[in-house]
Image (cartoon, rainbow, N blue to C red):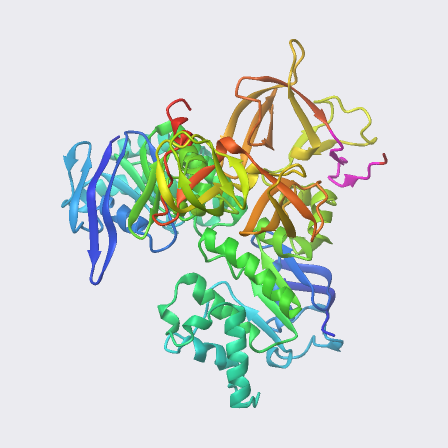
Amino acid sequence: MAEIRVEALRKEFTGFVAVHNSSFTIADGEFVCLLGPSGCGKTTTLRMIAGLELPTDGQILIDGEDVSMKRARERDIAFVFQLFALYPHMNVRKNIGFPLLAQGMARGDIRQRVEEVARLLRIDHLLDRSVSGLAGGDRQRVALGRAIVRRPKCFLMDEPLGTLDTEFRDLMVHELRELHNRIHATTVYVTHDQLEAMSMADKIAVMNHGIIEQFGTPREIYDRPRSMYVANFMGSPPMNFLPFHGGLARGSRQVQVQGVDVAVPEVYDDHAPADFALGVRPEHVRLDDGSALRGRVLGTEYLGTTQIVVVETADGVLKARVPADDRIDEGEIVGLSLSSSHLSVFERGSGRAIETALFQEVGHG
Amino acid sequence: MVEVILRGISKRFKDNQALSNLDLVVADGEFVVLLGPTGAGKTTTLRLVAGLERPDSGTVTIGGHDATALPPAARDVTFVFQQYSLYPHLSVYENLAFPLRSPARRVAASEIDRRVRETAKLVRIDHKLENKATRLSGGEMQRVAIGRALVRQPSIYLMDEPLSSLDAKLRAELRLELKRIQRELGATVLYVTHDQIEAMTMADRIGILQGGELIQIGTPRQVYTEPRNLHVAARLGQPSINLLPMGLLPDSGLPAGTKTVGARTEHLRIEKSPNGASDGVVDWIEHLGDQSHLHVSLGSHKVITLSPPDTPLSSGDKVTIRYHNPLCFDSSGERLAVHP
């Protein structure tokens, strides 16, 4: 097991920079997701940790040892691609034991290790079956077993669930996390799916154009986004932004949006007049006839238990998530009240969140 | 009027009965989504409408004409696949124009130009018409692929998981766009997916397929609130519906013959129990961003519901749980009607 430290990592390919000056630390036993859209540099970062790409600059330390320029096989890591790649002509036992056989381990030891791993994955009753006859879930467990059996220092996974049916994917997400809770192997997992990241990760690194925008626990990332990019990437539908212009005074607890005063977490610094945006998640918007902030309902999107109401306000469209039983008619004029303690304020020029009491909560949960 | 009618369709591949006696009507201008896991018969249904497969029995009627024996080219349908199959050496413009340049179609050059530009605007790719198809992002390529299907203005659009190869984020955006485009054109669409969110948000009607049979078809609200059986109930909703045996919670007033109670978030009242009697204990609250899941243990059973962002509950709390108009299923898994 191992701590992975990435320091000022940079990767250039001819003509473009895939990863800019990234630094983060993955503690021993932690499950970290690198999250972002395609082309954000997440896979390149993972491949550098694996030793499949060499960095242009910066360092990678595994358990304090600088491995930046070491080959992949000298790093004692297991890289899991799409999980389905098995040897079709071998049975389950041979598939799982193959990496040990390749290392030249004694047969008796291999047998013991394979059985241990099979028990962990609850496939010990399948050991002598051919892999070609297995159901999808069991095949995937075998592929995982083959990665675990070597007891590597860490696991690196590149969208291992990418090609699966959604339902099966939900199941595997839970199994992967449960497996992690049992073996506590340091894991770096690349995905573009925020729900996968939110369900599995201890920490998430949200990446954008080769830059880590924010590194933190799933709750920090979702509840206290440090940039408009993160706020917009997380959540479906994403955070709403209500633009406003003006100065902000240290200690103030309200901002004016569309001529209406809205209470916000206490502002910590003075800000000269500029373009700002008030950020509010759809689940923190309530339809409230008493509110002075008003808009017209453009439509609703039915999701079963909840529905998304799309409201056109004077300054753009805003989405609210409300119970599906609430009767809402297209064209109706509604009031909108925002849950003050959850609001973010962004400086639109830089896209960064300004310091408010919202971030104060970090310390005490 | 373009209406697609499938009557009594069966199709067998060697020892696999892909479809059994399927009846399905897609009305003119309707967006129908077939939802089911891999192997349910979704893609086979599309291929039968396209003419890429012939049914063993049954008929396919398109726009009032029997199309069962017609070759694909004679059916006036268009197919959008999962992978955007663009011509890499051509520009976006040429990719869009290609279906119209077929000698069989004889579309005038000025008309081609008009249609290409109109379609490009519709799929919001008009700013990249001169780009090579390979110099686009994944979402742009898929928009061109959808645009290429639209430019021909066929009777019906067949779509086989066209969004599944895209990033999750992009998928959510294109979902809304596709629905908007369909509405604007009044297009008839038959769309297959295994993603329940796509089905819920885009479909006028959802057809639930399982093992080659159409189990239920109805509006998203119908199949969600009145599922025909346990299978349909379990297929829709996130978190999945809780299926609990009779007798676990006070269930007087539920119909006779109820074996299993199906309870989604809206069917349960979960409250912190005052001192004394409780039904269960809150295990934990799972924060998944836009959803928080409340996990409650009731003895050996688990209940998972959506928890509001401002829930007063926290892990370790003892709670009372009561049903509120839940769904009831009999011993064969069929839903029982509840008379108030």
Q: Taking A46 as reference, is A303 left or right? A: right
Magenta residues span: B324-338
| Front position in the image: A134 or B253 | B253
The relative height of residue B95 versus residue A42 in the rendered view (above or below) is below
Instruction: Please report the residue visible at 37 percent of the width from the left and 24 percent of the height from the top.
Output: A363
Q: Position of residue A350 (x, y in %)?
A: 34, 48
The relative height of residue B186 versus residue A213 in the rendered view (above or below) is below
Please identify the dominant SS of the magenta region. Answer: loop
Q: Can residue A134 be spotted in the picture?
A: no
Q: Position of residue B216 (x, y in %)?
A: 72, 52
Inspect the magenta stretch and tell me whether residue A292 lies in it. no
Q: Quadrant of the C terminus of chain A?
A: top left
Q: Quadrant of residue B64?
A: bottom right
Inspect the magenta stretch and tell me whether residue B331 lies in it. yes
The relative height of residue B189 versus residue A8 in the rendered view (above or below) is below
| Front position in the image: A110 or A73 | A73
Q: Quadrant of the N terminus of chain A?
A: top left
Q: Position of residue B143 (x, y in %)?
A: 49, 66
Q: Can residue B178 be spotted in the picture?
A: yes
